[in-house]
Amino acid sequence: MAAPTFRLITTWSVPAPASRAWQVLAGPGPTWPAWWPGLRTESAGIVAGPDGLSGAGSWVRLRVRSPVGASLGLRLDLLESRAPGPERPGRAKLRVSGDLRGGTVVSATARAGGRCEIRLTWIVTPMRGRPALVARVAPALCVRAHDRVMRAGERGLVRHLA
């Protein structure tokens, strides 16, 4: 029996302009582990885009510590990226491989009061071992674990931008 595919959508509200939040999210090199508890960079290959941020072809291998005691090994490959502009959100599309397979799209949209909304949409399938087993027998547990990891990221980014 194959593991289910998850469609997980998280929205963050960040007290910073979209351009500033985007610089942190798409900066040249994976800075997320510095502010996102439970993330660790194992290796990375960065291709600088014309704006000096990470461009298409960049990749990172991450270890994500799960609140259910396991950790996931992921590789994220940046397929396309566009910084936010005055009338358009920033957007990045990434391929996900490793313990999960699928993709994710990240967007950053300017909001009133100098705030930014970051939306992360993951469409992924656990591929093997413990993550796939847990997904088959307790999919709701996987969703809750994902939500906790993502909320930790939101809190960390808000602190980082303060």
Image: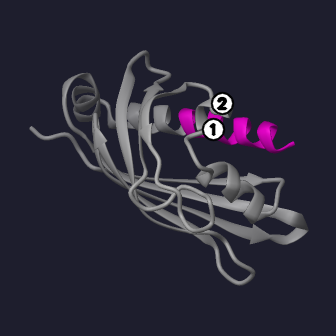
Q: Position of residue 4 (x, y in %)?
A: 23, 45
Q: At x 23% / y 32%, what residue is drawn?
A: 132
Q: At x 71% / y 35%, what residue is drawn?
A: 156
Query: Which segment did they paint magenta?
Result: 148-162
Tell me the tag on residue 153.
1
Between residues 35 and 12, which one lies in front from this camera angle? 35
Q: Position of residue 27 (x, y in %)?
A: 62, 51
Report the quarter where the N terminus lies: top left
- Magenta segment, prevailing SS (helix, strand or loop): helix
Left/right of residue 87 with respect to residue 27 in the rendered view: right
Say whether disc 1 or disc 2 marks the residue closer to the N-terminus. 2
Q: CA distance from mark 1 to mark 2?
A: 10 Å
How did the renderer colour the structure? one colour
Amino acid type, callout 1: Gly
Instruction: Determine which residue is flagged by label 2.
Output: 34
Camera-side mark, 1 or 2: 2
Secondary-structure class at tag 1: helix
Between residues 68 and 128, which one lies in front from this camera angle? 128
Give the answer, above or below, for where 58 lies relative to 115.
above
Q: Quadrant of residue 91?
A: bottom right
Q: Position of residue 19 (x, y in %)?
A: 74, 64
Confirm whether the magenta stretch covers residue 152.
yes
Left/right of residue 45 with respect to residue 26 in the rendered view: left
Amino acid type, callout 2: Ala
Left/right of residue 32 with respect to residue 95 in the rendered view: right
Report the quarter where the C terminus lies: top right
Give the answer, above or below, for where 99 lies relative to 119.
above
